[in-house]
Amino acid sequence: NYLTKEIMIQETIVTTQNSSGIAHIAPMGIHVNGDDFIILPFRPSTTLNNLLESKTAVLNYCDDVRVFAGCLTGRRDWPLTGAEKISGQVLSCALAHTEVELVRIEDDPTRPRLFCRAVHTVNHAPFTGFNRGQYSVLEAAILISRLNRLPIEKIEAEIDYLRIGLEKTAGDRELEAW
């Protein structure tokens, strides 16, 4: 099947912390290949520094798109709780989370590949599905994170298209995030 590929990308919120216990929250597409979770932070980044220091992270599966958008606009004060099996923090609004530990690094001057394995996974609440407004905000957040890598005309055209789904299906959270 031409649609089959080995690596899937899951849009998550990654939480890491430094040796002082200060947490960092960042939206990130995590590559999943079998049992490997591959985190690819750009250099320089707090996520990269924290993961190299602590060797752990939490992958938060979240349907509150305000977190994705907020992290890109400077809001990173989302409520957290302690992880269960690693030294780390879990996003309180996560529907589920996976605690991971770093097992291997493929270094790269721009974007190293950090291979992690799951230590513990917890489901907190049922996933009831996405609406197009959530998808629109998520895609817009990804576009905004690439302002320095994509032509502004492309970003503006895609934002205009995403606005259609938002206007048809968004709830209060999605409108706030937009």
Image (cartoon, rainbow, N blue to C red):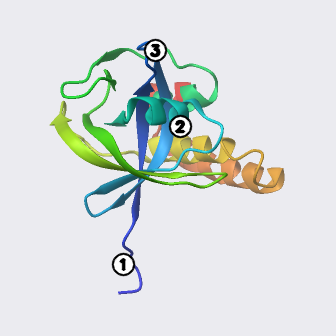
Q: Secondary structure at mark 3?
A: loop
| Residue identifier under label 3 | 22
Residue 48 marker: 2
For disc 3, the neighbor class at 10 Å (few under 14, some 14 to 19, many from 20) is few
- Relative to 97, is 75 on the left or the right? right
Tell me what residue is drawn at x 55 percent, y 54 percent. Answer: 107
N-term-proximal mark, 3 vs 1: 1
Quadrant location of the N terminus? Answer: bottom left
Contact check, label 2 and label 1, Cβ < 8 Å? no
Tell me what residue is drawn at x 54 percent, y 40 percent. Answer: 137
Tell me what residue is drawn at x 65 percent, y 47 percent. Answer: 143
What residue type is disc 2 on? Leu
Q: Nearer the viewer, residue 86 or 4?
A: 86
In which quarter of the view is residue 70 placed?
A: top right
| Residue identifier under label 1 | 4
Q: Nearer the viewer, residue 41 or 26?
A: 41
Contact check, label 3 and label 1, Cβ < 8 Å? no
